[in-house]
Image: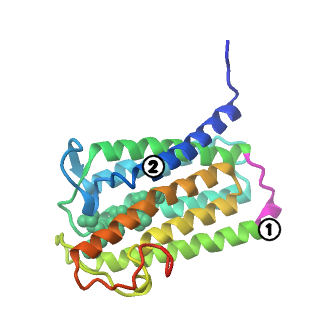
């Protein structure tokens, strides 16, 4: 009988995320994910966007902690720091961000929520299992260049993401649902600095964790958000005749 060890199964899931990233990247140039400004009919039943965000991101908090806590190295310092960074982002994204969204009437297709739940379950499992069990993180890793650099990049990305989302929230008064041209901060140079910040966060986390599972997540985040940033940028240009011409989509001066 064919049997697989747990580490082989883990590797298989990591490869799955890399493959999913490649497919997602190509697909999103043809079909923009139908939520937010790109919401449209034809994607099945929809639920309030707030509930959608909470449901789809919950595995990244809850499953991550559950898988992490049964690892052999769950009480080691470096894994605990990596856990802390992850949860610092995801507790906010799951339980605080949805209540900062200004339009309460916005909806999200259940199909999008379902796909995100599957992704987050796999992603949380491979990353939590790696840092608390399969990975080898002596305390000295804390003082190595990749770890320090990764943590710095993570917090730089976090600050950019937070500030950029804050600018967007302030464009609407409570209950309002329309769109305006965002200005200030990194919006001087790009249309989607919140996505740039998010990409930096997970590249930083992957460098600090120095793992294939972390890299797979960083690559997936870029594959997911880069085409969406290009779609958002095109959308802004179509909607606003006076849209700043020098602004790029997501990477200042380049893309
Ligand atoms: N790790 C990942 O792969 C991943 C994937 C997706 C999202 N995210 C993160 O999740 C967060 C939200 O993503 P998103 O795709 O919903 O971002 P988004 O399209 O930039 O929207 C963020 C919020 O601001 C509102 N908004 C956007 N542009 C606006 C404008 N011009 N005027 C007024 N309000 C505006 C949106 O309202 P509407 O909903 O009404 O459009 C939404 O509530 C971001 O921080 C992103 O980085 C991460």
**Nearer the observer, 190 or 110:** 190
Looking at the image, residue 182 sits to the left or right of residue 71; the answer is: left
Q: How is the image coloured?
A: rainbow
Q: Check disc 1: other Cα within 10 Å, few if <14, some if 14-19, many if 20+.
A: few
Residue at x 22% of width, y 41% of height: 44
Residue at x 38% of width, y 73% of height: 165
Q: Which quadrant does the N terminus fall into?
A: top right
**Nearer the observer, 143 or 111:** 111
Which residue matches tag 2?
24
Q: Can the viewer see residue 93 in this picture?
A: no
Q: Nearer the viewer, mark 2 or mark 1?
A: 2
Q: Position of residue 181 (x, y in %)?
A: 27, 81
Q: Whole-Å distance between the Cαs marked 2 and 1?
A: 34 Å
Magenta residue span? 135-143
Residue at x 45% of width, y 56% of height: 224
Q: Check disc 2: other Cα within 10 Å, few if <14, some if 14-19, many if 20+.
A: some
Which residue matches tag 1?
144
Tell me the quarter of the picture where residue 215 sits.
bottom right
Which element carries disc 1, helix, strand or loop? loop
Looking at the image, residue 120 sits to the left or right of residue 73; the answer is: left
Q: Position of residue 246 (x, y in %)?
A: 39, 85
- Tell me which image quadrant ligand 1 sits in: bottom left
**Nearer the observer, 136 or 211:** 211
Q: Position of residue 93 (x, y in %)?
A: 42, 61
Which element carries disc 2, helix, strand or loop? helix
């Amino acid at each position: 009988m064919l049997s697989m060890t747990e580490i082989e199964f883990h590797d298989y899931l990591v490869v799955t995320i890399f493959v999913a990233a490649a497919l997602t990247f190509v697909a999103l140039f043809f079909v923009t994910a139908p939520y937010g400004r790109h919401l449209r009919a034809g994607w099945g039943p929809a639920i309030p966007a707030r509930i959608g965000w909470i449901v789809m991101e919950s595995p990244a908090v809850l499953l991550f902690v559950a898988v992490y806590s049964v690892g052999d190295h769950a009480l080691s310092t470096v894994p605990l720091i990596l856990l802390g960074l992850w949860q610092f982002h995801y507790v906010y994204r799951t339980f605080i961000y949805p209540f900062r969204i200004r339009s309460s009437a916005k909806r999200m297709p259940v199909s999008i929520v379902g796909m995100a739940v599957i992704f987050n379950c796999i992603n949380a499992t491979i990353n939590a299992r790696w840092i608390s069990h399969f990975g080898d993180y002596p305390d000295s890793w804390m003082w190595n260049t990749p770890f320090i650099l990764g943590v710095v990049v993570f917090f730089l990305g976090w600050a950019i993401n937070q500030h950029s989302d804050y600018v967007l929230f302030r464009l609407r008064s409570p209950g309002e649902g329309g769109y305006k041209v965002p200005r200030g901060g990194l919006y001087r140079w790009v249309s989607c600095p919140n996505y740039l910040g998010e990409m930096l966060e997970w590249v930083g986390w992957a460098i600090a964790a120095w793992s294939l599972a972390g890299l797979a997540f960083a690559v997936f985040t870029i594959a997911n958000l880069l085409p969406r940033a290009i779609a958002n940028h095109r959308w802004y240009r179509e909607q606003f005749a006076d849209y700043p011409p020098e602004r790029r989509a997501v990477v200042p001066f380049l893309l």
